Amino acid sequence: MWVRNKSSVANLNTLAHISLLAVAVAAITNHEGQSYRKLKAIKRTA
């Protein structure tokens, strides 16, 4: 990690989880299912 304290690590983890949830919501709304090959395209829409 490039951060210096525990609260900064917690903030980065929170942002990572929010990003993953946004990708999951985009996959559901686009009816893509669990196609991992199209993950880059799903990330672009999120």
Image (spheres, rainbow, N blue to C red):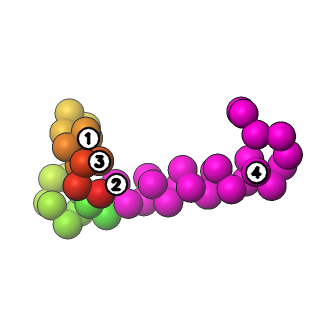
For the point 19% across and 43% down, which residue is it?
Answer: 41
What amino acid does circle 2 point to? Val
Reading the chain from its start, which is encountered first: label 4 or label 3? 4
Report the magenta residues as a range: 1-23
Mark 4: few, some, or many residues within 10 Å (few <14, many ≥20)? few
The reply to whether callout 1 and callout 3 are in contact (CB within 8 Å) is yes
Name the residue carrying label 4: 8
Q: Was residue 24 drawn as part of the magenta stretch in this picture?
A: no
| Vertical side of 1 occupied by 23: above or below | below
Is 6 on the left or on the right of 40, as rendered? right
What is the CA distance from the residue labelled 4 to the residue labelled 1? 28 Å
Q: Position of residue 9 (x, y in %)?
A: 74, 47
| Residue receiving disc 2 | 23
Labelled pair 1, 2 in contact (Cβ < 8 Å): yes
Q: Are marks 2 and 3 in contact (CB under 8 Å)?
A: yes
Residue at mark 4 to residue at mark 3: CA–CA distance: 24 Å
